[in-house]
Amino acid sequence: CTMAQPIQTNVGKAHAHDNVEYLYMSLKTLYKRHFLPLEEHYSYGDFFSPPLQDNDIEAKPFVLLIGQYSVGKTSFINHLLGDKAEGYPGSNVGPEPTTDRFMAIMHGTEERVLPGNAVAVSPGKPFRGLQSFGNAFLQKFHCAEMNADILQSMTLIDTPGVLSGEKQRIGRNYDMSAVSKWFAERSDLILLLFDAHKLDISDELKTVIETLRGNDDKIRIVLNKADQVTPQQLMRVYGALMWSLGKVFKTPEVTRVYISSFWDKPYQEAGSPNKLLFDKEKHDLFRDLRDIPKNAAVRRVNEMVKRARTAKVHALVCACLRKMMPSMFGKEKKQKELLAALHIIFQAVAQEHNISPGDFPDVDDYRTKLANWCGSGRTLANLPKLNRELIKRLDACLSNEVPNLLAPLAIGSQQGAVEERMVTPGPAQSPAFAFGAPGNEQATAATMEEIMAALNTNDDCEPYSRPGTAAPP
């Protein structure tokens, strides 16, 4: 059977247009001028991700592949690269868990494999943030360089097969979920691969998928090796896969599923009646991959806006928590009460500052990070005061400078979509901020009244000035 061809040589070459280069340069300037001061002032890196480097902004798009072992992730990548007999440098294909490390496959003039510690400190590669995971992970991270057409416009991330059964209990010496989340936040497309004969979702895979929340628009499902089952069996396999995914994603939206066999071998006899379907599905996936470089500049702006809105929410919540802390006695007791009522703090901040509930982080995750931050001899009273000047500058940038930055790209409806996400939403009325358990309404109302009263005072705000400059009037 004739297989669909890999992505061709001209993928994304028009992407290196002057307008796009200007956008990246302007984004770096805006980030350092308006976003970074707010992040540094409120220790954003201690709660979320570290400050962005220039390479993080101008890096080629990432395509992240995740799945259990032996579902065909490495074979899929080799198929995209042109089906070289030896595969990409350092690759190994087999029915057992062969890929035991994270591999970043990037473009290079010669084929070589670079160790993780060297890659993480390299000023020319966008992986400096991986240093936070320590040497245990960096020993399991490598960068493979090779000269392939598709790598001129994107970087492919191959991951270890997600463990199951006894292997899952043995564990790893690094946090697989945290590392996957780091890559997911920086990826333009996330491919979850499943084998038509291996649909079970292990606990580790479930945990990894849960860490991908917030990146739902990037996720695509790939049902690989679909030619190994008959059309009737494929219908049942597809139904079972959607049922399993529905329990993990917990969302009414249907995730796009690509069904085919992604390697250089002809389709097997069992799946030959579905040849046209498999070719069409493969063509659709390759088309989505081709579109990534064209949309990368807009996605960079979108991700920057998401980060800025999260940083603003973080700053306002920190300022609110500080206001609620007593100045002298009873700090420990009050801190416990505030952490327990963090969902009410979110509700109060959302209503006071007219912020959408979708901009707030997961309340349980944020509570854990606050508790860890306070565990090093600090209390919530040590959080920074509200700095209105930094907030004002960030809002002005999102309202004026970022939309103006998109205008030269002439992206039409996409620009409207991005600008729509930057419009200040109405008051928060979301069940995501549900109050405490039934029967506790009176205590909840009293807490809410106390928080709103604190937010309406201006006695705990501070001016901001850069080092060596006078404070604004």
Image (tube, grey):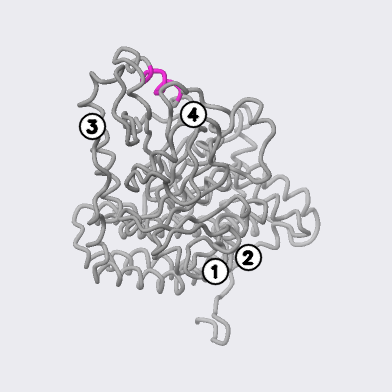
Give the class, few, some or many, for how many residues have Cα within 10 Å of label 4's Cα (few <14, many ≥20): some
What range is drawn magenta here?
237-244
* Mark 1, residue position: 387
Structural distance between the alpha carbons of marks 2 and 3: 57 Å
**Where is mark 3, residue-wise?**
279
The vertical placement of 207 against 147, above or below, is above
Alpha-carbon distance for marks 4 and 3?
29 Å
Q: Considering only order in the chain, which callout, 1 or 3, is on the residue closer to the N terminus?
A: 3
Against 149, is 445 above or below?
above
Q: Which residue is mark 4?
A: 248
Quadrant housing residue 444: top right
Labelled pair 2, 1 in contact (Cβ < 8 Å): yes
Chain-order first, disc 4 or disc 1: 4
> Is residue 241 one of those drawn in magenta?
yes
Q: Quick one: SS at disc 3?
A: helix
**Tag 4: amino acid:** Val
Residue at position x 30%, y 46% in the image? 289
Residue farthest right in this picture: 329
Element under disc 1: loop
Where is residue 238? Give x, y as percent. Answer: 36, 21
